[in-house]
Amino acid sequence: MHALARALGLSTALIPGVALAQQSATLDEISVVATTPVGGSASGIGSGRSRIPADGTANQAPAAGRLRGGDQPLYKIPSTVETVTASAIERDTGTFNAVATLARVTPGLNLSDAQGNNNRVDVNYRGFTVSPVVGVPQGLAVYQNGVRINEAFGDTVNFDLIPPSAIQRIDIVTGNPIFGLNALGGAVNVQMKNGFTWQGTEITALGGSDGRIAGGLQYGTQVGDWSFYFNGDGLKDNGWRYQSPSQIGRIYTDLGYRSQDSEFHIIGNFARTYFGAAAATPVDFTHGDPRAIFTWPQTTTTQMGTLQVTGRVDISPTWDLSGNAYFRRFSQTYIDGNDGNFEGCNRNGSFFTPRRLCYQDDAFSAQPGQTNRQFRDQFLILGQGVATPGILFSPNVPYGTLDTTKTEATGYGGSLQAANRDRVFGFGNSFVVGGSIDVADYSFKSSSALGVINPDLSITTDPNNPTYGFVPGLGTTQLRTAAALGIAPSAVIGSNLYMGLYATDTFDVTDDLSLTAGARLNFARITTQDTTGFSPDVTGNHNYTKINPVAGLTYRLMPGLSLYGGYAESNRAPTPLELGCSNPVRPCLLPNSLVADPPLKQVTAQNYEAGIRGAIPNFYDGGELSYKVGAFRSDLTNDILQLSSPGNAARGYYVNVPATRRQGVEVGAEYTRGDLAIYANYALIDATFRFSGTLASPNNPSADADGSIQVRPGSKVPLIPDHQFKVGFDYRVLPGWRVGMNLQAFSSAYFRGDESNLNAKLPAYYVLGLNTSYQVNENLQVFGLVTNLTNNKYASFGTYRQPGLVANLYNTTDPRTTVLAQPLSIYGGIRYTFGSAPRPMEEPIIRKY
């Protein structure tokens, strides 16, 4: 064991749960990655560095070291794998989320902070996005312990619901359609700790900038064949912008059992989060006060509960069967105060004298046969208890709305997979076949209440005045126009059925040359039903089917150098939100309403990838050098975009566009020694549109009179920097004292809404971070973290605002809105370990290629 620890450059014991074979001296240590959602071993044998035969054949390995399921040595995977370990996540404890670690070390990955909260950011990997925001097109599949956690209604992913200290490992796997829907740009596979992989008791407490107070407890134990793991944490802070507090509470538990040939786990994950102001701010405001926000409140409350059962059985020395089943409950409520899109009714309508309150009708056109008066009368504002002739209009009232949405989903399903590692005609072979089913029932409701904009930009209602959102005995009114155009309550119920069948085979032509081929059949059925009567077009059934092939090869030129290359296809089905909001004639208050339902096409991708990677032991002074160079291209057909509505940019819709492309190059290297780890990587991400056409972007300063912009082949996709550079180190200065520093630098990117690329970009920026820890004794550790060390003022997200009353009152002339990044923040805390819990932070390895 000590020899292995020295080979890895570890300063403490091995990562627990990886048992050594009896004849460990004859076995090589290799990096192992799960290439299917189900994975191979719940206790992590197939999810890290393990001693198994160098050729990866299972039938020559003792049971403790054999490969299982879809696990493969890294050098046999014909695509890119990026890995973040528990030790790397622990270095970022002050941030309290794993997304910050992904951004710090992963090439080709950047964050777009559209909400001013580092717990709810958009993750962009190679130009594909995964986001917690309903309405953002999702291009990555995300799994936790083999269960797809893209939520049912909008495929959103809420990383804030996962306690980061409970994560054992995160792998980003590209070019693999076996991960099912949404894996256009790849899949994020999160594997959690359990009592077999982590034992002991550990308490963490921290505090710091913006009134942050946080703490956590994790406990793991193994008693004979049984194990138990518990992780609970909580956070509260005020946020670095006004009215933007965060409250997080999470619990994760795992009860496990294993024998010589099987392993089973019962897992529970429960979380509740609450976040404040969540929108971009006019740059005219932030020039005067970086903490400024726009209209508020903007609160998001999320609750989630998941129960899961996972299992694996070795049927024979070369066959194993693994699977999981789950039940998931999700609920999210969003309250958003907005500038009202109201005006006095048009003089050509019936309600001009005395003038009544109407909705702005600029984005709409009269239907054939409609008179001008009939068209104008459709926009009279009505609501519960507010009958025709409606509400008197006052030109001196700053009207606003309080918009509320509530999404609830109940999901269940499972996966089953069989794997075989029999030799075929004397050659090594790994065959996997499996299937999955995911079912979800969801409901979505939205409503708007009439309010008033106060001098502090808060939107409130007056319970003593029915004009402002309240009616005695009825409570808050649900506003709508007379014809339910533009603004109306929505209530939609529906269900999703996602099924997949897959098979993949890796055949060893020689000990060094391996061929991989396989395919996955995806089927999606999405059902929506309007329950209000206002939007009958929402009701519909949609079916999508596609077979996605994968093929690739790897060649190990020498133990420290491998070549890889592959081709794969992938797809994603439109979400219920996208299907229910795809008509530009009847735009939605995104993401607040569903009003129309012309069908959208599924998005398909063709992915190409090639590169070299390897590791050189004893490169310098006993250390190891890991490296990689790779190139990729993804060509998408029928990509889905979110567009604003001409004449009313607060509302929008979704469209298919003919073609987009993401391509680029990634270069990375890492040097690790017992007391030192250094990494550096660079990524070129060229994300472009590949068609000529017109898109709606009414707030773009370069838009024409109709609020449209022109897109040409080669126009850049907004918010994706072309150039990304990351470098960092971690050094043991003295026994027990470690210091680390990291730098991330990104080139400029276009604002969202500037698909024509005619306006100024978001400026290039860099951010510097610092972390340190001191092991006072065997049990007590003191740690600190500094983010944005130079207090650099930059924005990773920008768009254009809608002209309106608030902008006029405050004389804002610049149409741009941004979210300034978190300023200089300092966190510190203690970590106390009872007994002999493992210390992954002492592991200098940040990532292995």
Image (cartoon, grey):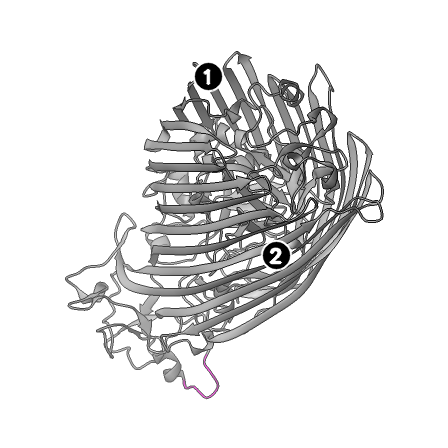
The range drawn in magenta is: 366-371
**Relative to 112, 717 lies left or right:** right
Locate residue 641, reporting x and y percent: 56, 60
Q: Nearer the viewer, residue 240 or 73?
A: 73
Q: Quadrant of residue 357?
A: bottom left
User: Mark 2: few, some, or many residues within 10 Å (few <14, many ≥20)?
Assistant: many
Label 1 Cα neighbours within 10 Å, binned few <14 / some 14-19 / many ≥20: some
Residue 44 horizontal side relative to residue 405, left or right: right
| For marks 1 and 2 on the same chain, the one whose residue lies earlier in the sequence | 2
Tell which of 492 and 770 is nearer to you: 492
Q: Any mark on residue 75, and which?
A: none
* Quadrant holding the N terminus: top right
Task: Name the residue tied to disc 1.
Answer: 774
Residue 295 visible here = no
- Secondary structure state at the residue bearing disc 2: loop
What residue sits right under mark 2 in the picture? Answer: 180
Residue visible at 43% across and 19% down?
A: 781
For residue 226, above or below residue 536: above
State whether residue 7 appears in this view.
yes
Query: In this picture, is 641 found above or below 563?
Result: below
* Separation of residues labelled 1 and 2 (CA atoms): 43 Å
In the rendered image, residue 368 lying in the magenta stretch gets the answer: yes
In the rendered image, residue 657, in percent from the top left (x then y), is placed at 62, 64
Q: Is residue 673 above or below residue 426?
A: above
Magenta residue check for 532? no
Residue type at mark 1: give it.
Tyr
